[in-house]
Amino acid sequence: MKSYSYQLVNVFAETHFGGNPLAVFPEADGLNTEQMQLIARQFNLSETVFLHQPENAKAVKKLRIFTPDYEMPFAGHPTIGSAFVAHRLFNLPDAYQFETEAGLVSLEHQDQRITFSLNKNVISEASSYNKDDFSALLGLKPQDILESSWINTGSNQLLVQVNSAKAVESCQIQPMLFEKIVGKNRSIYIWFEENQIAKVRLFFMNGGNIAEDPGTGSAAANLGGWCILNQRYPMHWQIFQGDEIKRPNRLMLRVDENKTIYVGAEAILVGEGQFYLP
């Protein structure tokens, strides 16, 4: 029987039971794709991440990121959680790169904060649905919906801007409309910003049911991409997410004058163990 060590980390956490839980397998070179998918389904977290030897010589590790249902090319909370674990275990410097299926991602450690940065073209596509469609999907009024578009800085997501923090808090997803408007294996990110504080929620399908992600770094990066496309940079926001499901997550989002996107947060180790395979 083979065993693989893993660590449980709460990412985007300011308290021990806050943040977004993540399972990190720091030495996963013996696992194949099918096994990694089955392990992710066993943990049933938003994502489980597996660290491998890199194919790109510029990277210290390659990340393979899995939800319970499918593999993702990039995701923010597995990236920061992997950095937290790898920096401690492998005596890494304070600045390095990870390889992902979406390309190289730069990491930096400063005090307790871990920040990933992206500097690539932002891919955007207008949504084919209108305010009435989104209000029906989200359980809101049409006047609550301001703008919607698909944004991709590493993971393609549907961003919907609403007119108040209350609208974000009041979202009630209608499952029958989700796959039609958002699509299978896709997610929708609802957001409102005022005074450099963004209130956000992200919903996705998990095993045929609607689930809410406590904290989403890739969507935060896409929000930075939206700011670039709409000439709202340089900028520096704090993101509040997860309070509605009693998992408060706090992220930092910054875009500099060179259109580089930075997403930063803290992480807390909450457990570790061995996973056995026959």
Image: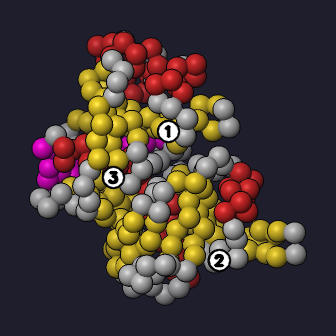
The N terminus, quarter of image: bottom right
Q: How far apart are marks 1 and 3 (CA)?
A: 14 Å
Q: Judge from the rendering whether residue 241 lies leftward or rightward of residue 78; answer left or right.
A: left
**Disc 2 residue type?**
Asp
Query: Is residue 28 shown above or below 20?
Result: below
Q: Mark 3 points at which residue?
A: 153
What whole-number distance in Å separates the C-alpha atoms at marks 1 and 2? 28 Å
> Circle 1 sits in a helix, a strand or a loop, which is it?
loop
Q: Does the magenta stretch include residue 240?
A: yes
**Residue 236, horizontal then vertical, whole percent:** 21, 52
Q: What stretch is highlighted in magenta?
A: 231-242
Q: Residue at x 21, y 55 (%)?
A: 255
Q: How far across and how far down the image is residue 112, in percent?
A: 40, 70
Q: Which of marks 2 and 3 is nearer the N terminus?
A: 2
As helix, strand or loop, the secondary structure at mark 2 comes to loop
The disc, 1 or 3, on the residue closer to the chain's N-terminal end is 3
Q: Which amino acid does label 1 sit on?
A: Arg
Residue shown at 40%/45% (left/top)? 156
Residue ID for mark 2:
29
